[in-house]
């Protein structure tokens, strides 16, 4: 592939943008879940008032815009990888559908799983977590504050769990061949157990050096 191959160059640029934005988003998600939740439990009200108005708007900015760029670049990457053929134009290609059998490929199974989980996570950020946090940070939450905090935390936990299987769905299409009920279920179970362990660990680590 030469430097003049526009399709390959565009694909790698969008792939890179997708992954660097994904790191930013999921990095912030893990910061909130593995560091900030235990931290908030250790702060008194005065400390929270000093820290949170400085910390949260910054962290939430990278979090939500990371999610948006990941999602948009992901949709573009899906189009280029599965719904476009250089020289022929748009339409589902052989990465998505086996030309002989007409069945979805293994690659398609994995990326569809990843994209369903990723899209739910993106919706949770923009539709639930950010609106709740925005109200809390603006000081307009009033007596809704406790309920909003609970909803944001629950949804953030759901996203943390979903991030495990989602990432299997992102990595497997290009780096793992098989897809069937057993491989997909195993990937889901391994990743959910890993996230569960990380959340449990987060309450016990780093209290001292
Ligand atoms: C939000 C919805 C998302 C959509 C629609 C989406 C879409 C895609 C697509 C179409 C691919 C290409 C798969 C292939 O090569 O066959 C991909 C790969 C990938 N995505 Fe996502 N993605 C999403 C979220 C995420 C998130 C949150 C991350 C977190 C880091 C992520 C990380 C990756 C990685 C690491 C790859 C593999 C790159 C490679 O192996 O070349 N994606 N994604």
Image: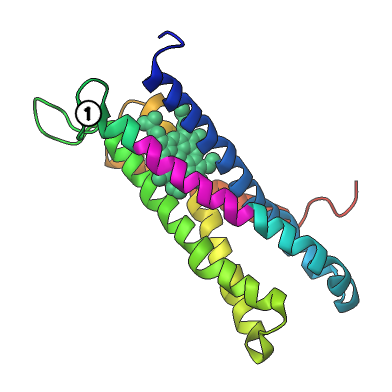
Q: Quadrant of ligand 1?
A: top left
Question: What is the span of residues highlighted in magenta in the rendered image?
Answer: 63-78
Residue 23 drawn above or below residue 42: above
Q: Nearer the viewer, residue 9 or 169?
A: 9
For this view, does 119 lie left or right of residue 48? left
Q: Position of residue 153 (x, y in %)?
A: 61, 69
Q: Is residue 153 left or right of residue 208?
A: left
Q: Is residue 70 magenta?
A: yes
Q: Secondary structure at mark 1?
A: strand
Residue at 46% x, 48% y: name it: 71
**Residue 51: horizontal and vertical position, in percent?**
85, 66
Residue 176 sits in which quadrant? Answer: top left
Q: Quarter of the image holding residue 2? A: top left
Is 207 located above or below residue 80 in the figure? below
Q: Residue at x 56, y 75 (%)?
A: 151
Q: Is residue 98 left or right of residue 71?
A: left
Q: Residue at x 39, y 35 (%)?
A: 77
Residue tagged 1? 89
The foreground one among 172 and 96 is 96
Q: Confirm whether residue 166 shows in the render.
A: no
């Amino acid at each position: 592939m030469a430097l003049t191959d526009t399709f390959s160059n565009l694909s790698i640029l969008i792939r890179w943008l997708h992954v660097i934005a994904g790191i930013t988003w999921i990095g912030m998600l893990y910061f909130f879940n593995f560091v900030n939740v235990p931290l908030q439990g250790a702060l008194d009200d005065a400390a929270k008032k000093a820290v949170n108005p400085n910390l949260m708007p910054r962290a939430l900015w990278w979090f939500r815009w990371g999610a948006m760029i990941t999602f948009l670049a992901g949709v573009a990457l899906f189009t280029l990888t599965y719904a476009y053929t250089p020289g022929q134009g748009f339409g589902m290609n052989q990465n998505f559908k086996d030309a002989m059998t007409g069945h979805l490929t293994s690659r398609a199974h994995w990326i569809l799983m990843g994209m369903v989980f990723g899209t739910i996570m993106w919706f949770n950020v923009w539709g639930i977590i950010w609106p709740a946090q925005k109200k809390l940070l603006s000081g307009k939450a009033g007596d809704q504050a406790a309920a909003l905090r609970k909803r944001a935390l629950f949804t953030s936990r759901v996203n943390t769990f979903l991030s495990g299987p989602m990432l299997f769905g992102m990595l497997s299409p290009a780096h793992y061949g098989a897809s069937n009920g057993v491989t997909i279920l195993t990937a889901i179970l391994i990743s959910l157990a890993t996230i569960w362990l990380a959340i449990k660990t987060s309450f016990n680590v780093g209290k001292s050096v």
